[in-house]
Amino acid sequence: MARRTTTLPMRDRIGSITSGTLAWIYAALLIVPFYYFIVSSFKDNEQIFESPLSLPTTWDLSNFVTAIDQADLWLAIANSVLTTLAALVLTLVLALPASFALARARGRAGKVVEGVFALGFLIPSFAALFPTFLLAAALGLFHTRTFVVFLLPATALPLSIVILTSFMRTIPRELEEAASMDGATSLQVLRQVYLPICIPGIATVLLLNFLSFWNAYLYPLILIGPDTAQRTIQVALPTLKVDAGTDYGVLMAGTLFTLLPVYLVYTVLQRQMQRALLSGAVKG
Amino acid sequence: MTHDVSRRAVLKAVFGSAIATPLLASCGALVPASSGPGSISVHTQLSGAVAGAQVFSDVVAAYRRRTGRIVAQLKNGSDLPIVFETSTLAGKQADVAIVNMMGRTLGWTDAGATIPVTDLLDAWDLRDKILPEAVAEWTDDEGRLRAFPFTRTNWPVSFNTGLLEEAGVEVPTTSDELIAVADALRSKGIGPVTVGGSDWSGQKLFLQILQGFVSQEEARTVFSTGKLSESAGAVAGVEHFVMLRDAGVFVDDVQGYTSDSELTQFNTRKAAIVPAMSSALALVPNERAKEVTVGGWPVPSSGGVLAHPSVIKSYNGHGIWISENGADKLDLIKPFVQDLYSDEVTDAFVLGSGRDMNRVTDTVSQDFPLVAQASRLTDDDVTPVMLPDLLIPDSVFEPMIKVTAMAYGSSASAARIVDAFEKSYDAA
């Protein structure tokens, strides 16, 4: 290995060092804020402002306990998990067959429907807030999680369908034709031919939508409301901030509860996505 | 093989969860606390990390245990007004809201979102229990009491005497003394006055400094119209502010600070002087409070109208508002509100959270020494000035804060500040 390095031309060595340096800088950009969050959650305000990047003097969990108590965080986390998971499942249940149909469509109707889905990108979320609120009130679902579980997939469908449709279009039609000749129904073709190959697309959709659903604030604030039994973690967290004299250690501890699932899901889905990509490449 | 497992896992997850979703989302352990017959719902800002939040929760729990009546708590912070208003549009607002009187809430009585409680004050035997000044402040121009005044706010100035001693100076009471103190502190590397120049806390201090040159009657006119240039006193106040700023009274880069960072600077001994409201004083750590004394903002050395250093004194803290829905449940709300004004609950708030209450009481905070000091300030020590929030139109608030943030910057002249201040009222 060392011999190979020494034989690299000067230009390649400079390129290798530059790219390595940039990679480390990029990694630091991601890690430093996370490190700051973690160490700050074990400190008081004085320590946070006096020595922001130093390790805490004690690894006392009192800030976490305070955050949980003050903002009813366990309930809020449970609500966020419930809402996010249900919305993700519903998104996939709707987006997969829709994308399957669009990917197989050859006529103009398919293009029109795909265009309609793409129009969803043009609707600013703020503009939709008031009509959505009226709809929730009219349906009797205002101040319920149920409405948000149905709403979030609606906001996510345009992007999900665009991603999944483009993935499905890469699948050779011969595979589908072979399955059909073996007597497979459309549903079986979707399940046994398209889905396995589309795992990278599904993982991508899950990841993007998880970030969007988990971090949603305005719609859950207005539509789910202030009931501690229903509100999500993003709505609960701001109650840890006060007009004057916020305890930033407690706020950071509370914020970690919302950051960790994001890191966790990203790590898990990223691995699955890479594995599925390799697997798909071999099969394809 | 890998594909088989992945496919099964995906399908199981998708279809299993599809069945479970509506079940989980509509029932289960996380049952909504919204009120039904025989219960009331209370939407409160006394929640989270706010001083008094835990006391309020304990009070509600004790009330439930004692009476067997259900009180559902709905919690928000500063976003309570917008959530309450949208809930009102859907007819699902809480029966009671506990929130302060500023901005959006000023329009609730007129809009019919909440009912006036003028008649209930006597009917529920609360008039003698609430400070008359508080009732006056919470009564609108048409004589309607908007809500029951619950908590109130003092806005003294805190001085770290330990840092002042290090600089060899004492607590200043005039503007000349303040400038000398600032010079001495700076020479020791200590920040003088810290304030949230970029937000409402800086705005409050700016308006407090102006009130050093105008009578309270004139201040009412100036703050409700915004016509600074038509008041010689107000213009003198702005010039005085600029003079103090240019003399280095405020910490460096003060226009970038917030109400949070001002208190943190003070608590970490980076600055020696901070104007902070009493609920924030309750959050000053005890070890810091030992070396702090509270007083007022130094009077102008010449040309001012105040006898003593000024303190913003307001009866505008949290109020107990009754919504349209609550109007149908007055028989259930009455005992709850009466309980909130009981001696026991008042003592619990004063002693347990350091809150200043609008309830008539002799109880003084013991574990919150700065709050106690502030409550002991008399008219011989300080001159009270108004909190102008009720006079400033709602739509002017944000534009005005931009103007005061600009005023804390080093380059803004008095004339430019006056001009921008008046323009901020154009949106009203």
Image (tube, coloured by chain):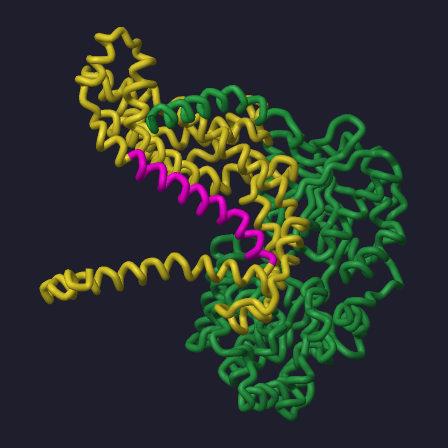
Chain colours: A yellow, B green
Q: Residue at x 70, y 62 (%)?
A: B279
Q: Nearer the viewer, residue A265 or A9?
A: A9
Tell me which corner region of the image, top left, top right, bottom left or bottom right, holds residue A32. bottom left
Q: Reply above or below: A132 against B338.
A: above
Quadrant containing the C terminus of chain A is top left
Q: Residue at x 31, y 25 (%)?
A: A196
Residue A79 pos. (x, y %):
58, 36
Judge from the rendering whether residue A214 lies leftward or rightward of residue B357; answer left or right.
left
Q: Residue at x 80, y 67 (%)?
A: B367
Residue B414 pos. (x, y %):
48, 76
Residue B37 pos. (x, y %):
77, 26
Quadrant containing the N terminus of chain A is bottom left
Q: Nearer the viewer, residue B226 or B3?
A: B3
Extreme bottom residue here? Answer: B168
Q: Is residue B279 magenta?
A: no
Magenta extent: A250-276
Q: Reply above or below: B272 against A151.
A: below
